[in-house]
């Protein structure tokens, strides 16, 4: 019995939150990796682009709520995703048209494009703050829990409760669907194959008649969908605050590089690696050990490897270690 | 002379702008802006050495700035005797353990051939070392932080004059740059950018959360100053006389004695803050001029030529027998050390150390915008960039407010859009800076004052 309790403790406080957070990171990391693989630059505006899409979802959610439209037990934000994504793609395409295209045609070095993306980051941040302001906003409605701790305890008779928030379930399900569709698209359709070819070897792809404009367009569309979904899911699960989204850029970059930048599947796994490492290294295992160890050996300290203050630092350290010992990422293999 | 014409015009325009702020807003504000411009100029000199001379992209400026600030606390604050007596010994042992770990790893790397066994040995040394550190430091940290937590709760510093901390800041930042450079300089440009950004985040989060070191997010206030305090100035007779002499014309117009005294008091209060800021301006200007002379000399020396050769073509420079790795490391350390000085200067200017305020936006990306806008590879350009961008950063909000009022003048006071826009005026600074960067990158990628190569 104690053993099951210990497992439940781990599930409740580490595994489920890590899966959720990992999914959110994974979507962002695939976004980074796609831009890096096809447009060939590190996009420092990642966090703010995700924030931009989420901003529309938040505003539309408020609008729909004022009209009385809702999805019952599901959050209203889910119906706003398509519209928000549309706005996001429009924004990305106009940014590409006015800013990035020039440097792409000129074949500027990637560092210059990264610098330009810093400029885009500033402008995007300004637009977001002017439209919605810097405040913290929650836009979650509908049923909050799928499984409450008290219900679980009643059902199973265990000491420890298991809580599953609806946002956690929604995040994991939607991420799985979105990512599967994306991989199907990249691997099985003709457009996807042409994108992979373009990423692999630009000149060869151009020689075989692939239209670069189309590839770039599709890349931004996929990136826009992933960025908006990732941003909205994060906002539903935690809350929406522009500054936090900017900061999330850092673990997202870490996930993309850990997975091997330019490799979407690596980025997908990288998100979970970062999330699990962050949560496992900063969780206090006292309760867990109280269950599995005999009474004589019970720990009296928190059994925490690192204080939760260092949550971000963990993912950055992993990234630095990976960069030093395996710069191509831990999941080597074919890119894109 | 002619070749310096654009430099002189650019600087004249900049100083006119600052003087205009003095006339239209206040002299105190103008001097505050000028001081921050000078601090930014030091940071941009540091970043420009790395990016302009050697093409190394360092997004970790925030980390070195924070270390410079930490140096001020560690050097100038008086030591907390009680904290030292309860936990000082353990902390010293910890320092010894860290040095021991580093040396034993170095020894293993040297003595044992590259193998799996060596990797396991190193991992074991690190894990045992960390466990040992935690065991020794945990009780000490707890007791140090318990010493008057509202006022101290940290080890304090050395109690030396604050100007020493500028040098200490340079050494701290340079030391970190040595470690970072050793491990990360082999990376490709964009990876290096990300790696340095994240390492800086780690450094800042350590400063933020290790309360025994510098009180973490509880901040250290009331740091020493290399300039007199306003209160003392307001009471010293020579200063009051000086103000009286300076404003004698204005004071002569006032007849009543008590009114005259009131006006004089107000003038003395204003003048004292201006005087203090002028002292800082003098100090900062000295640093900027010294750095400018040194960097300018270095740029046009054989060493500077070699750096440019390495930047423009690493392979060719390597083939000519230049040690690219060593030079990259050297310049990375030098640039970071200069940024460390700037960090120390800034904390000295503010008189307080707030680790929570170190954010990548303000301390990395804005500095980079300065370097790019000003002119990469040109020291005058980098300094000008520091001035222009800091000026925009501060003045963007008032200017935006002016335009908002102008364009929404026909709307009623309570109009929702107008109120919303007026409330969001501060965020226009991001828009201005971002647009400035994008425009410069597009139409003048070398910056306002481009790099000049003197051939003789």
Image (spheres, grey):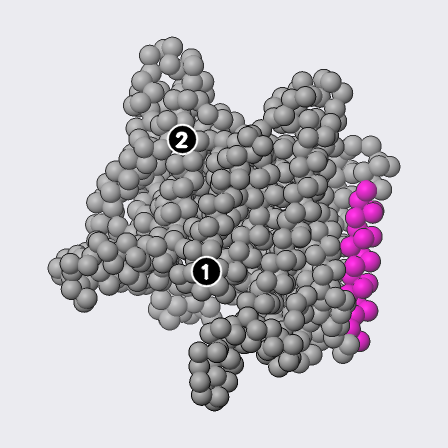
Q: In the depicted view, which residue is nearer to us: B199 or B453? A: B453
State yes or no: residue B95 in magenta: yes
Q: Is residue A119 left or right of residue B105?
A: left
| Residue B117: quarter of image | top right
| Residue at image point 76% right, 69% down | B159
| Residue at image point 69% right, 79% down | B147
Q: Pointer 2: what residue?
A: B443
The magenta span reads B84-106
Q: Chain of mark 1?
A: B
Give the percent coordinates (x, y) of residue B187: 61, 33
Q: Main secondary structure of the magenta part?
A: helix
Would you place residue B441 above or below residue A318 in this image? above
| Residue B86 visible (yes or no) | no
Give the percent coordinates (x, y) of residue A245: 41, 52
Mark 1 and mark 2 on one chain: yes
| Residue A79 visible (yes or no) | yes
Q: Secondary structure at mark 2?
A: helix
| Residue A310: quarter of image | bottom right
Residue most toward the left? A67
Quadrant into which the C terminus of chain A falls: top left
Q: Pointer 1: what residue?
A: B22
Question: Dot 1, how many residues are within 10 Å of its Cα: few (below 14), some (14-19), or many (20+)?
Answer: some
Q: Chain of mark 2?
A: B
| Residue at image point 17% right, 57% down | A64
Q: In the depicted view, which residue is nearer to us: B326 or A21? A: B326
Give the percent coordinates (x, y) of residue B235: 62, 81
| Residue at image point 83% right, 47% down | B103
Tell me the number on the disc at residue B345: none
Q: In the depicted view, which residue is nearer to us: A331 or B430? A: B430
| Residue B383: quarter of image | top right
């Amino acid at each position: 019995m104690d053993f099951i309790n210990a497992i439940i403790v781990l599930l409740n406080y580490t595994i489920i939150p890590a899966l959720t957070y990992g999914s959110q990171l994974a979507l962002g990391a695939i976004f980074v990796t796609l831009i890096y693989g096809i447009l060939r630059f590190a996009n420092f505006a990642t966090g703010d682009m995700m924030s931009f899409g989420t901003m529309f979802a938040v505003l539309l959610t408020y609008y729909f709520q004022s009209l009385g439209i809702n999805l019952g037990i599901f959050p209203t934000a889910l119906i706003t995703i398509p519209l928000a994504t549309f706005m996001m793609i429009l924004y990305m395409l106009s940014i590409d048209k006015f800013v990035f295209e020039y440097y792409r045609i000129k074949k500027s070095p990637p560092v210059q494009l990264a610098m330009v993306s810093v400029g885009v980051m500033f402008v995007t941040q300004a637009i977001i703050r002017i439209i919605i302001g810097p405040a913290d906003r929650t836009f979650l409605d509908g049923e909050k829990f799928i499984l409450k701790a008290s219900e679980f305890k009643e059902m199973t008779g265990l000491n420890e409760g298991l809580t599953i928030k609806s946002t956690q379930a929604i995040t994991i399900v939607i991420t799985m669907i979105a990512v599967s569709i994306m991989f199907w698209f990249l691997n099985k359709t003709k457009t996807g194959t042409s994108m992979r070819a373009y990423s692999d070897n630009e000149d060869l792809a151009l020689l075989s008649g692939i239209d670069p404009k189309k590839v770039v367009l599709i890349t931004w569309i996929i990136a826009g969908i992933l960025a908006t979904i990732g941003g909205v899911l994060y906002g539903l699960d935690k809350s929406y605050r522009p500054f936090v989204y900017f900061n999330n850029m850092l673990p997202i970059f870490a996930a993309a590089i850990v997975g091997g930048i330019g490799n979407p599947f690596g980025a997908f796994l990288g998100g979970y690696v970062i999330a699990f490492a962050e949560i496992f290294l900063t969780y206090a295992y006292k309760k867990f050990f109280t269950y599995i160890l005999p009474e004589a050996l019970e720990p009296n300290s928190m059994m925490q490897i690192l204080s939760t203050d260092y949550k971000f630092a963990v993912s950055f350290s992993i990234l630095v270690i990976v960069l030093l010992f395996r710069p191509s990422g831990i999941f080597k293999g074919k890119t894109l | 002379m002619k070749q310096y014409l654009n430099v002189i015009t650019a600087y004249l325009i900049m100083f006119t702008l600052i003087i205009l702020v003095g006339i239209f807003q206040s002299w105190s504000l103008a001097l505050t802006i000028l001081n921050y411009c000078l601090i930014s100029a030091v940071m941009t000199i540091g970043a420009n050495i790395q990016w302009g001379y050697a093409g190394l992209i360092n997004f970790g400026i925030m980390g070195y700035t924070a270390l410079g600030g930490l140096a001020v606390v560690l050097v100038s604050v008086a030591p907390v005797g009680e904290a030292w007596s309860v936990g000082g010994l353990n902390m010293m042992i910890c320092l010894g353990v860290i040095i021991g770990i580093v040396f034993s790893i170095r020894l293993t790397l040297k003595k044992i051939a590259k193998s799996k066994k060596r990797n396991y040995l190193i991992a074991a040394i690190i894990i045992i070392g960390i466990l040992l550190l935690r065991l020794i430091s945990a009780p000490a940290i707890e007791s140090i932080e318990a010493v008057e937590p509202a006022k101290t709760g940290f080890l304090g510093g050395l109690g030396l004059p604050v100007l020493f901390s500028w040098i200490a800041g340079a050494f701290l930042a340079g030391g970190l740059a040595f470690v970072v450079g050793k491990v990360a300089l082999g990376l490709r440009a964009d990876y290096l950018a990300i790696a340095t950004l994240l390492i800086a985040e780690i450094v800042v989060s350590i400063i933020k959360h290790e309360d025994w070191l510098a009180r973490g997010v509880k901040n250290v206030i009331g740091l020493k100053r290399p300039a007199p305090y306003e209160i003392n100035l307001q009471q010293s007779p020579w200063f009051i006389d000086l103000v009286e002499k300076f404003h004698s014309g204005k004071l002569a117009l006032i007849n009543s004695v008590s009114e005259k005294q009131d006006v004089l008091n107000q003038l003395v209060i204003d003048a004292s803050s201006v005087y203090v800021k002028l002292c800082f301006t003098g100090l900062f200007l000295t640093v900027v001029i010294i750095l400018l002379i040194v960097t300018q000399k270095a740029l046009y020396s054989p060493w500077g030529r070699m750096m440019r050769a390495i930047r423009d073509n690493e392979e060719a420079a390597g083939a000519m027998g230049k040690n690219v790795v060593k030079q990259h490391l050297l310049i990375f350390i030098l640039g970071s050390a200069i940024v460390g000085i700037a960090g120390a200067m800034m904390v000295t200017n503010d008189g307080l150390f707030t680790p929570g305020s170190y954010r990548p936006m303000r301390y990395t990306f804005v500095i980079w915008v300065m370097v790019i806008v000003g002119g990469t590879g040109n020291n005058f350009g980098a300094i000008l960039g520091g001035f222009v961008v800091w000026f925009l950063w501060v003045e963007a909000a008032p200017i935006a407010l002016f335009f908002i009022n102008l364009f929404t003048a026909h709307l009623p006071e309570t109009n929702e859009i107008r109120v919303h826009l007026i409330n969001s005026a501060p965020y226009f600074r991001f828009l201005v800076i971002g647009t400035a960067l994008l425009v410069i990158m597009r139409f003048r990628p070398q910056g306002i004052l481009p790099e000049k190569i003197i051939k003789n």
